[in-house]
Image (cartoon, rainbow, N blue to C red):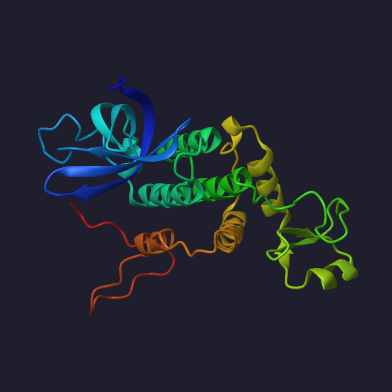
Amino acid sequence: MGGPLRVRALVLRETPVGEADRILTLLAAEQGRFSASARGARRQNSRLVSATEILSLTDFSLFARGGRFVVDDAERVEAFAPVKADLVRLTCAAHAAELVLDCVREGDPAPEIYRLALRTLHALSRPDRDPKLTVRAFEMRLMGLIGFAPCLEACVVCGEPPPADAPVRFSYGRCGVVCPKDACRRVAGASEPLPAGVLAALRHVLSAPEESVFSFSVDEDVRRALARLSERYVQDRMEKEYGKLALIAAFEEPAAPAKGAPPQDASGPAPAADA
């Protein structure tokens, strides 16, 4: 039997098996997506408990047995605790993990997607970064990495760059911008207006150096428009509906007033009760 495989990997999914085991789905730069069995990892006194938790970056020592990997030892490198402590950030991270699982095939090297996943978790860990903007930037950058980048620099019909400051539209069917010419809009078919701020954000996300992908900010109107575009674009390209981010609205909705409670002043929040 050969020596162990030592690899640093991100835990994208953990599946309970039996009374105390876990099957891990891991993402590594060179190995891509692969699975490993972690025996006894759910026992409270196991040295593998924290190292095999979902969304942990871990140094693994693995043996190949019976055609699959078995965890021999593991040491967690990073837990991304701020992500796991916040429901919105955790939901965004879970959505990102689901997308990565769908985009990376078993055993295919995926160094760029691996680095993007780690940068996304680091960005989601930062209190100065809007997680709802971060996850949409992740989505569109990922689409670019797997060959689904929309065409943003030239009209998808005539192939010419739109005039500077000209109002453009976005075609989901043709995967890119449509210039203002009537003929192009007729040929493109269904399209929608693409605000300048959203176009600028998309261009940044798709073309910025990987270390700068999340180094931008937008106002709330642009963020919402970008979210709508990204959500539909990803679902169209992946041919799948992703539902995790819809939960965020439920987290953020204000609680309904108790039955019989007096209405609050609409001009602002109610004062806090005395301690």
- Of residues 114 and 21, the one nearer the viewer is 21
- Taking the image as shown, residue 152 lies to the left or right of residue 24, namely right
Whether residue 232 is situated above or below residue 121 in the rendered picture: below
**Horizontal and vertical percent position of residue 128:** 47, 38
**Horizontal and vertical percent position of residue 121:** 43, 38
Whether residue 261 is situated above or below residue 19 in the rendered picture: below
Quadrant position of the N terminus in the picture: top left
Instruction: Answer with the quarter of the image where residue 58 lies.
Output: top left
| Residue positioned 11% across, 48% down in the render | 19
| Residue positioned 31% across, 67% down in the render | 255
| Residue positioned 16% across, 41% down in the render | 42
**Residue furthest out toward the bottom:** 260
| Residue positioned 60% across, 40% down in the render | 216
- Of residues 140 and 21, the one nearer the viewer is 21
- Taking the image as shown, residue 67 lies to the left or right of residue 50, namely right
- Of residues 95 and 262, the one nearer the viewer is 95
